[in-house]
Image: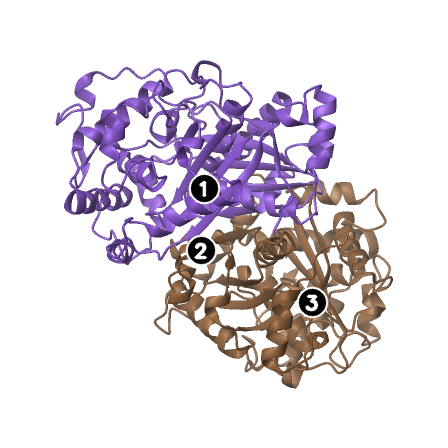
Chain colours: A brown, B purple
Amino acid sequence: MIFKKVYILGGAQTDFAINWQRNGGEIADLLKAGFEKAATNCNIIPRDIQSAHIGNFVGELFCKQGHLGGIFASIHPDLEGIPTARHEAACASGSMAILAGMNQIQAGWCDLICVSGIEMMRNVSGMEASDHLGAAAWVGKEATEAKYPWVYLFSEIADYYQQRFGLQDEHLAEIAKINYANAKRNPNAQTRKWEQEERCFVTDEEYNPIIEGRLRKADCGRITDGCATVFLASEEYAKQHAYRSQIPLASIPYIKGWGHRTATMLLQNKLEKGKESAYPFPHLRGAIHDAFERAGLSNVRELDVIETHDCFTISEYVALEHFGLANPGEAWKMIEEDAISFNGKLPINPSGGLIGAGHPVGATGVRMMLDAYKQLTNQAGDYQVANTKNVGTLNIGGSFTTVASFVVGV
Amino acid sequence: MIFKKVYILGGAQTDFAINWQRNGGEIADLLKAGFEKAATNCNIIPRDIQSAHIGNFVGELFCKQGHLGGIFASIHPDLEGIPTARHEAACASGSMAILAGMNQIQAGWCDLICVSGIEMMRNVSGMEASDHLGAAAWVGKEATEAKYPWVYLFSEIADYYQQRFGLQDEHLAEIAKINYANAKRNPNAQTRKWEQEERCFVTDEEYNPIIEGRLRKADCGRITDGCATVFLASEEYAKQHAYRSQIPLASIPYIKGWGHRTATMLLQNKLEKGKESAYPFPHLRGAIHDAFERAGLSNVRELDVIETHDCFTISEYVALEHFGLANPGEAWKMIEEDAISFNGKLPINPSGGLIGAGHPVGATGVRMMLDAYKQLTNQAGDYQVANTKNVGTLNIGGSFTTVASFVVGV
């Protein structure tokens, strides 16, 4: 089966360091700011946009606001009347919006689509935010005793790794350090100005306390406000855009491959099932494999950059192995070889990832796609990885329940 | 542009009269019950399902549960691993799930898809439910003083009709009566066993009190629990299904046309803008026109049945005109001629619609598609309309903000 090509014409993200409520903004203002920055950034004609897809996890809980497609149609006069919808799969919501947009282009409905991922979360207390995010687990069936359900569940994953393969907390700490270091080069990263001493990454009950289970403060992504927007286009529209922008079509990145799978919801069921497999999360390996196969990649070494989910350090650890960068249980080798840092063989999260750049949950999948675009078009500024031809992404919803992976390239 | 055909292989709805919580069920149980009934009903092989799309408006608010795609992958062993996502546009969420599924088939990704619309709402008080449903309006910007935001906003629409065209409450009451009467023939309708005397439909402060503005109890749809599921298929898979089921391919309904548009969110802006047009909601007229055009219909009289949104009687009144059944402001003629009742020229909502059959909001668009399927395959039992070849649907999110219309036929 040959699918129609889907190009990425660019986009923008808001500054993830901004506390949107403290700046007097509501979720609609964030969506509008994100759209306007993106449209201006890449010279898009708003009246050419034929459809919009919004990625959002829990606007209803944080902002009491659903129906964000309606809000989107209200933020610019040229967007009034277009079809819009919101898509959700917990922290993978942004990728769901991309997939829905891709499908619409591949189906032949539309030539230019806007995909916007958004989450506003800093308007409530940390405890309340944690409670709201619990809606991504099977409510009432898991993590019921936990103070922070997601820290609890990912700590369970770390424990499982410890038991099955052995796991050293120092390797997780190294993942955090790399992401924070990378974020310092990213002018939109939430943590870019944070000053963190060595004791913020080691066993230090004051500077790096246990949050839940075995995971410490440095292992955890933070609550973030943000919006990320990309424009997807058919080949026909991409050609026009190239002509108008005086760039060759071949310089515009396109989605080469994608994978999307959903495992059973309960973490314990997944872990139990994973015991039968070489990989703890075979569906995750499968989704990445789907993306590679569609992109015609035979080996992960053909990727020049990976932007992966690191809601917790252990998420990235798991991802490294499932991408095929190390055998199961051996991600530590990549870390010890310094292969994944900004100057390593295969930089992981040059943006800073979720831990460094921030994790406005519904925006994250779109932010990854945007960062892929930036790397592929040499627009990543201080976090540019030279000679990038192929970027892999991995976006995760829940405890590796929904997984979505893309290969984007030129 | 020729689009790939998308067939409907059947499905099922749960009994909308059931209060799910009172029966000891959670939202996951409702999703599972809906899927199992549908799969059994139409002889679907679960392991053939390649993707699933869930329509749900506010599971987070009513049940604290998001990530319903993950739940879906957990309700049957053969569904584990498939891609899933949840789609939302307020009360039009079910249609958003259908559109996403359609796109995936048209794009060539999948041959068999499950679309499930779901909402569980009777587990909270009426006031709390009304408050949760407010998330479909622009929160903080409209209906801020209203006790019941949606009754308030649709009452505003009725007032606008009164001012622009004249509107008699008796005609709205007649719409309610027809929907309740139709529901008595539908074995899954929420209100099928309700006994309602004449005084429940007239100006009677005890039996039919004002709820908000000018809308009375009988004008309003009720809070409902329910799940509706349909299976969509490519032509290739529909052929196999026809062979296995020993029916001709030509007897399987397919989606002939569709329209989907999103207006600006605030009702007052829509009403203001509508003044410039012959139709109060030109985008609604446009979406229906899109569906007709794609289906190759030149006139609404080519439809044999319409299943339309009637969250309130005024919604159906507006819909009748925007379908082209009467000139703007003249829907009352259709009602006086008895054209829209079960034995009329063009039966509207033979199922009972939202008022009679029930309105579990995320399920409604899927329930409409399912009823279209039933009418087209002569499976509607006591509410079967003879010789149905084409069915139109209209699903609305918010104050006519998101509108989605389908033409389904054989």
Give the number of callouts. Answer: 3
Position of residue B115 in the picture relative to residue B147 (left or right): right
Position of residue B342 in the picture relative to residue A241 (left or right): left
Q: Read off the residue under disc 2.
A: A69
Can residue B393 be seen here?
yes
Position of residue B13 in the picture relative to residue B237 (left or right): left
* Extreme-bottom residue of the structure: A382
Q: Residue at x 53, y 24 (%)?
A: B376
Q: Read off the residue under disc 3.
A: A254
Cβ atoms under marks 2 and 3 closer than 8 Å:
no
SS label for mark 1: strand
Q: Do badges 1 and 3 share one subunit?
A: no
Chain bearing mark 3: A
Residue B250: image x %, image y %? 64, 27
Q: Residue at x 33, y 29 (%)?
A: B355
Cβ atoms under marks 2 and 1 closer than 8 Å:
no
Disc 2 and disc 1: Cα gap in Å? Answer: 17 Å
Q: Read off the residue under disc 1.
A: B405
Q: Nearer the viewer, mark 2 or mark 3?
A: 3
Quadrant of the rendered image containing residue B112: top right
Task: Please name the amino acid that badge 1 sits on.
Answer: Ser
